[in-house]
């Protein structure tokens, strides 16, 4: 499958419910690179690269999140991969 980049913004009760931790775990299991971070507006932002089928799995996860998350809305955009990421981790600055 062709590689791609996906940018995902997840809205709802998604901070303080292990959303970033679980996203990192899922992305690493899928073999994706990129990062996840909390945003000042209370959303979670994910940027990931890898095969399109694995990115679609990550997108599917982001639509429900971990057990205590309450996802209200998910926005996403596919773009060309940049190959700038070495692994998948947290990013702390906004």
Image (cartoon, rainbow, N blue to C red):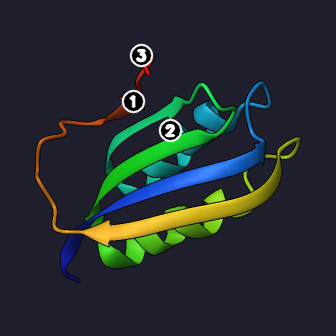
Circle 3 or circle 1, nearest the eye: 3
Q: Which residue is mark 3?
A: 93
Label 2 sits on a secondary structure element that is: helix
52 vs 80, nearest the viewer: 80
Residue lying at the far front in this picture: please name it.
41
In three-dimensional space, the C-alpha distance between marks 3 and 2, rounded to whole angstroms, equals: 16 Å
Give percent across and percent down for residue 56: 47, 74
Q: Residues within 10 Å of mark 3 (few under 14, many from 20)?
A: few
Q: Quadrant of the N terminus?
A: bottom left
SS for dot 1:
strand
Q: Which residue is mark 1?
A: 89
| Residue occupying image coordinates x 16% and y 61% | 81
Which residue is outermost to the top?
Answer: 93
Write down the residue under mark 2.
24
Pointer 2 or 1: first along the chain:
2
Label 2 close to label 1 by CB (< 8 Å): yes
Relative to 54, say whether 27 is above or below: above
Q: Could you tell me if the residues under marks 3 and 1 are in contact, i.e. CB atoms within 8 Å?
A: no
* Residue at screen point 79% across, 54% down: 71
The spot of residue 12 in percent (x, y) is 79, 47
């Amino acid at each position: 499958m062709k590689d791609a980049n996906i940018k995902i913004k997840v809205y709802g009760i998604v901070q303080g419910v292990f959303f970033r931790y679980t996203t990192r775990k899922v992305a690493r299991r899928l073999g994706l690179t990129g990062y996840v971070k909390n945003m000042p507006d209370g959303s979670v932002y994910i940027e990931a690269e890898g095969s399109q089928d694995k990115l679609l799995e990550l997108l599917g996860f982001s639509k429900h999140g971990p057990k205590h998350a309450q996802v209200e809305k998910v926005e996403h955009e596919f773009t060309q991969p940049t190959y700038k990421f070495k692994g998948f981790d947290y990013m702390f600055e906004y």
